[in-house]
Amino acid sequence: MRGRTRIAHLPEHAGQEVTLGGWVTHRRSKGKIAFLVIRDGTGICQLVASVRDVDEETFARMEKVTQESAVLVRGTVREDRRAPGGYEVLVRELEIVGPADEYPISPKEHGIEFLLDHRHLWLRHRRPWAILRVRHEIVQACRDFFYDNEFVLVDSPILTPAACEGTSTLFETDYFGEKAYLSQSGQLYLEPAAMAFDRVYCFGPTFRAEKSKTRRHLTEFWMIEPEIAWAGLDEVMELAERLVSYVVERVLERRRTELEILERDTSKLEAVAPPFPRMSYDEAAEVLLRPENVARAKEAGAPPFEPGNDLGAMDETILGELHDRPVMIHRYPARVKAFYMEPDPENPDRALCVDVIAPEGYGEIIGGSERIHDPGLLRRRIEEHGLPEEAFRWYMDVRRFGGVPHGGFGMGIERVVAWICGTRHIRETIPYPRTINRIYP
């Protein structure tokens, strides 16, 4: 609506008459004065009306308007440190544009399943509002980081003919009589693009059909994935370190208000700066096998760590809590990692890969590696993993026609949002979570 002022810009209009559009969050009256609090997506504002300054009809609307009704308000901006945001509006006119029936989310406590069933309305409330504004900042920070570092955005397809991470976690669909799958990662399609543009990245939804019910898993989530030509594992780790540090610094700089709403201890985020500690998988295994850590995992009911296996959620928690910033675990056993990872020339049983584990028990936020660039070795790995060679013919071409060492990683946006916001469950970090038992709304 033309001429409407957004609440975030009220300080620029002190003493002036403005028009606000928003939704009612609170209402109260005190004798001949009525108060409303409205929000408009940029902030909240208190509206004040006196029977001396408005007509009877306007004052009656102020007293009777229901929670989450949409209103259009005209009035004068006044500075008041006691008011939310430090400014309030003295109402001259108030129009109810979209009246709300009995709003289902009341100030009382509601269970998480009820709130998720009403996620389309719950988005309006302070906590999800703050989390998703932090998410917005994280996504924009990533885009700015890659743009400033001369990466080219290349959109990978969502429909693919074969698996990237493993055949057991695919969503299958019919593609005009042929089998197709929802993408598990944009990485495979980025690798050819790296040979064209040197530095590339993609950002989009990814899908995993594993039947997991943990607080760290979604079936649909978003990943940002860079890929770099002429890069080895060291360059991949250095890029991940720089990206994570930049994102955290950006959120601290621009989203303090939202972090305060979430009651996030920002001192823990302020410690996040390069260099990040680095541990080999074998060093991490030694830590996990210490008696006190074995006992802790057992007490938590977590599967015991077994050398040679991938890390579990409790393993990541234990390792992450050792440091005040993310820790990089590198050179996992090749047999537990993806087929495309380059083996360590000094120990071929180990892959040149890295997982970045967030502190405070938030687990893995990044997984990456140097990629195999030898066509013969890649063909053998495809066979060993039981993958259809014909579906990866184009992927082999990247190695057959001028292949060079290259590497990259994937960063899960929701896991980063959960860590930075300090929320324990990943379902709060995406507008409409998709889990093994939820596809509504």
Image (cartoon, rainbow, N blue to C red):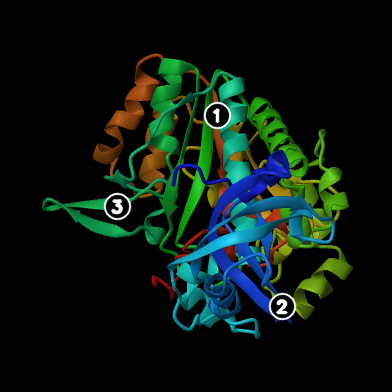
Earlier along the polypeptide chain: callout 1 or callout 2? 2
Question: Which residue position is annotated with label 3?
Answer: 181
Earlier along the polypeptide chain: callout 3 or callout 1? 3
Mark number displayed over residue 407: 1
When the figure is inspected, residue 412 is found, relative to residue 390, above or below; the finding is below
Task: Work out how far the residue at label 3 is from the one at label 2, CA to CA, in angstroms.
Answer: 64 Å
- Judge whether residue 249 can be spotted in this image: yes
Task: Work out how far the residue at label 3 is from the one at label 1, CA to CA, in angstroms.
Answer: 24 Å
Which residue is at 88% across, 50% downward?
Answer: 267
Name the mark nearer the viewer: 3 or 1.
Answer: 3
Which residue is at 45% across, 37% downward?
Answer: 187
**How many numbered marks have been drawn onto this rendered protein structure?**
3
In this rendering, position of residue 217 left or right of residue 315:
left
Query: Three-letter amino acid code at disc 1?
Result: Gly
Across and down, in percent, residue 261 comes to 74, 61
Quarter of the image that includes the C terminus? bottom left
Query: Three-letter amino acid code at disc 3?
Result: Tyr
Front-lying residue, 29 or 160: 29
Q: Do the residues labelled 3 and 1 touch (CB within 8 Å)?
A: no
